[in-house]
Image (spheres, rainbow, N blue to C red):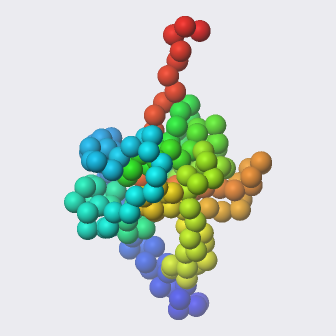
Amino acid sequence: MNPRLLVTFALIFICTVSCLNNPQNHTTMNSISKNHAFYSRTDTNQININNSEWKKILPPEMYEVAREKGTERAFKGKYWDADTKGTYYCAVCGNPLFKSDAKFSSSCGWPSFYAPIRTNSVVYEEDRSFGMSRIEVLCGRCASHLGHIFDDGPAPTYKRFCMNSIVLDFEPETQNSSE
């Protein structure tokens, strides 16, 4: 067997085991992360905050994924199988990212979408970590790591935005009482 492949599998195994011992409370983390000056659901201007400042603001588990490009365990995130109508925002800065209408069940264990709300809601970077070649998806406002994009999604885009729940904030649609 290829030594690089063995190292990759060993790293994945170690990360998985460490995640087993680190349960995440998304409700508490997301409410804490909103209480800072950089969080806004209406301001879409880019912000450039250094990681030492983010480290003071964000809960450790969110910081690890958002700023250190970590990944939460499959099938453990809050939104992987959610089907409520509404809008997904960046949990770090409040930037609108995805509508639930673009969410689909991909069985990969992470929330998956076929398109962002706006083309500049997210930005892309090449990711060659762990011996793989992937496209990383970052928040278009604060440049936090959200997940990766793959070419195996449904029509109309045939894209799968595979996102980490811990860096998503969700606002359900409200029913208009006058209807």
Image point (28%, 55%), residue name: 58
Report whether 22 appears left or right of 125: left
Q: Quadrant of the N terminus?
A: bottom right
Image location of residue 168, percent across then percent down: 44, 48
What's the residue at 58%, 74% (across, down)?
126
Quarter of the image with the C terminus in it: top right
Above or below, 179 relative to 24: above
Work out whether 172 lies above or below 6: above
Where residue 33 appears, x then y in whole percent? 30, 48
Residue that appears at 34% across and 63% down? 49
Of residue 43 and residue 13, the one placed in the foreground of this image is 43
Image location of residue 96, percent across then percent down: 50, 44
Q: Is residue 126 left or right of residue 153?
A: left
User: Farthest residue in the top direction?
Assistant: 178
Q: Residue at x 61, y 77 (%)?
A: 133
Using the image, determine if residue 142 lies above or below residue 43: below
Q: Is residue 69 visible?
A: yes
Q: How many marks?
A: 0
How far across and down, in percent of the image, does residue 149 sit? Answer: 62, 61
Task: Give the image quarter of residue 100.
Answer: top right
Is residue 76 something one can see in this rendering?
no
